Image: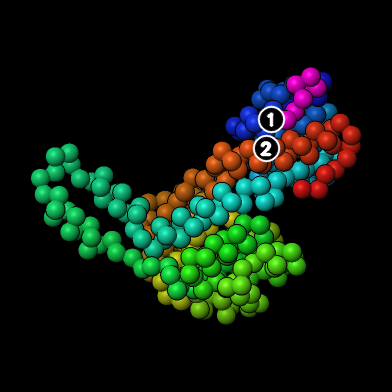
């Protein structure tokens, strides 16, 4: 029997691809051959000598100590693209939320008392405070055109936005999948200066960590709206808070909240929900279970 240790709630439909006769799946193994996880941080976890494969049921692997895994001979698998549609749908939701004050309206509704005697007056107040622009015809910069960024760019094009994409590493196949309305530019400075919205789709690495900082915000149009469903580490949070408080950034919606971003007007934190749909959880789990089981049983590495 192969032992598989799970962390986080993993889709049952995904785990069911492990052959019951060959696999013992538990949250409590200490001598497993494989791990399947979502966002649990493995950096402080000591792996048993039996460990051979880790399947990260998501796109990024930054919660896995990949260098140490390489040293210890553990192969790390992930599920690129498997949650792209789920993330795209929430990014589009966030774009609308960054314009139209849905979140503020919900807070407004919660302040109304039961049996509020003058709802009409409260409605007038809400109506005069919570207007916001349409996205039709506005310019958006989609920074990173991988599986998720490409879908976001096409969806923004379909919504009638003017879409400017940026990705120095875009593959020919990814370029071919972009709709005709998506223009690619090669200078980030030019993009920042002209767009009304930014959607981030870059990985965090030594080149991109903290790259969205005061220097960059200074190059942006006043009142830019930024949505970040890529990684929190792309943003210098202190600079973002300053930019939001000054109105330079009209709205920041992030799937990566931390203490410094909470309870600030015009910053909307989302509890890392981009990939949280049953469909995406199933797709991701199935992809990594297939890869891990093939590797454990045959030693073959299936490229995702
Ligand atoms: C990802 O990297 O794709 C997400 O972090 C997945 C998740 O939310 O588990």
Residue 270 at least partly seen: yes
191 relative to 49, above or below: below
* Colouring method of the image: rainbow
Give neighbour class at mark 2: few <14, some 14-19, many 20+ (Cα, 10 Å): many
User: In percent of the image, x 59 and y 51: which residue is there?
Assistant: 85
User: In percent of the image, x 66 and y 41: which residue is there?
Assistant: 284
Q: Nearer the viewer, residue 62 or 104?
A: 104
- Quadrant the N terminus occupies: top right
Stretch of the chain drawn in magenta = 17-23
Q: Which of 126 and 147 is in front in this view?
A: 147
User: In percent of the image, x 70 and y 50: which residue is there?
Assistant: 80
242 relative to 71, above or below: below
The disc label shown at residue 285, or none: 2
Secondary element at tag 2: helix
The residue singled out by tag 1 in the image is 15
User: In percent of the image, x 61 and y 75: which residue is there?
Assistant: 183
Q: Nearer the viewer, residue 37 or 49?
A: 37
Q: Does the magenta stretch include residue 1?
A: no
238 relative to 64, above or below: below
In the displayed structure, does residue 214 sit left or right of residue 146? left
Counting from the top left corner in percent of width and height, residue 49 is at: 84, 30
SS assignment for the magenta stretch, majority: loop
Secondary element at tag 1: helix
In the displayed structure, does residue 122 sit left or right of residue 99? left
User: Label 1 near label 2: C-beta < 8 Å?
Assistant: yes
């Amino acid at each position: 029997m192969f032992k598989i240790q799970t962390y986080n709630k993993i889709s049952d439909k995904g785990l069911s691809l492990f052959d019951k006769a060959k696999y013992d799946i538990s949250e409590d193994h200490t001598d497993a051959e494989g791990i399947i996880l979502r966002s649990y941080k493995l950096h402080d976890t000591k792996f048993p000598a039996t460990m051979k494969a880790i399947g990260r049921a998501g796109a990024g692997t930054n919660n896995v100590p990949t260098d140490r895994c390489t040293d210890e001979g553990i192969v790390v698998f992930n599920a690129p693209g498997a949650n792209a549609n789920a993330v795209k749908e929430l990014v589009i939701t966030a774009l609308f939320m960054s314009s139209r004050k849905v979140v503020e309206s919900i807070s407004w509704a919660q302040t109304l008392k039961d049996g509020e005697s003058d709802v009409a007056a409260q409605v007038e107040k809400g109506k005069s405070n919570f207007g916001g622009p349409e996205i039709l015809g506005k310019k958006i910069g989609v920074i990173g055109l991988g599986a998720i960024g490409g879908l976001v760019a096409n969806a923004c094009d379909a919504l009638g936005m003017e879409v400017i994409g940026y990705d120095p590493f875009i593959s020919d196949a990814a370029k071919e999948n972009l709709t005709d309305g998506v223009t690619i530019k090669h200078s980030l400075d030019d993009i920042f200066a002209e767009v009304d919205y930014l959607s981030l789709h870059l990985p965090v690495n030594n080149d991109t960590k903290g790259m969205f900082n005061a220097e960059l915000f200074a190059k942006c149009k006043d009142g830019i709206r930024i949505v970040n469903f890529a990684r929190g580490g792309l943003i210098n949070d202190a600079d973002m808070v300053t930019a939001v408080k000054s109105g330079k950034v009209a709205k920041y919606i992030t799937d990566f909240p931390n203490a410094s971003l909470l309870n600030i007007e015009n910053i909307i934190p989302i509890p890392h929900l981009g990939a949280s749909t049953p469909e995406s959880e199933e797709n991701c789990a199935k992809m990594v279970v297939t890869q891990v089981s093939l590797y454990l049983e045959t030693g073959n590495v299936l490229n995702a």
